[in-house]
Image: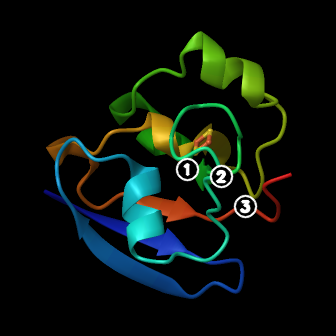
Amino acid sequence: MARITFVALDGSAKSYDAAEGVSLMRCAVDNDVPGIVAECGGACACATCQVLIAPDWLDRLPVAGPNEASMIDEDSGERGMVRRLSCQIEVTPELDGLVVHVPSSQY
Ligand code: FES
């Protein structure tokens, strides 16, 4: 279990307990986090589950695989954060306290 906080574009934040092994995308969708669309349901095929994560969390996240890397523009980060596909990040105990920001656009 890990406590994950999602920050909306307007700066409002909500936190949820996520079970180990579920994706950040599933946590967001199950809790109706606005702005996380996830059209493909986690198949790494739509890039509409993008989130922004502060660089100091990156060493606790899995490295983006080739499919994810091909769908994310390396320079597309915002507000000093890195863009990732939330469906490709499984919750682990090490992610307890993670803060995830919704990007300005999924397209
Ligand atoms: S849900 Fe489609 S790429 Fe993540």
Q: From the viewer's side, name the closer residue of 54 and 107.
A: 107
Q: Is residue 55 above or below residue 101?
A: above
- At label 1, which amino acid type do we have? Ala
Residue appearing at x 61%, y 63% in the figure? 36
**Closer to us: mark 1 or mark 2?**
2
| Quadrant where ligand 1 appears | top right
What is the spatial separation of the Cα atoms under label 3 and label 1, in whole angstroms? 12 Å
- Horizontally, residue 53 falls left or right of residue 75, namely left
Furthest toward the top, the residue is 66
Residue appearing at x 17%, y 55% in the figure? 19
At label 3, counting other C-alpha atoms closer than 10 Å, the crowd grade (few under 14, some 14-19, many 20 or more) is: many
Q: Earlier in the sequence, mark 1 or mark 2?
A: 2
- At label 2, which amino acid type do we have? Glu
Indicate yes or no: mark 2 CB to ligand 1 under 8 Å: yes
Residue underneath mark 3:
103
Q: Earlier in the sequence, mark 3 or mark 2?
A: 2
Pointer 3 and pointer 2: residues touching (CB < 8 Å)? no
Disc sitting over residue 46 in the figure: none
- At label 3, which amino acid type do we have? Pro
Residue underneath mark 2:
39
Q: Position of residue 105 (x, y in %)?
A: 82, 61
**Closer to us: mark 3 or mark 2?**
2
**Closer to us: mark 3 or mark 1?**
3
Q: From the viewer's side, name the closer residue of 43 and 24.
A: 43
What is the spatial separation of the Cα atoms under label 1 and label 2, in whole angstroms? 24 Å
- Figure quadrant of residue 30: bottom left
Disc sitting over residue 54 in the figure: 1
Q: Position of residue 9 (x, y in %)?
A: 71, 77
At label 2, counting other C-alpha atoms closer than 10 Å, the crowd grade (few under 14, some 14-19, many 20 or more) is: few
- Horizontally, residue 95 falls left or right of residue 99, namely left
Residue appearing at x 75%, y 31% in the figure? 72
Q: Is residue 11 above or below residue 35?
A: below
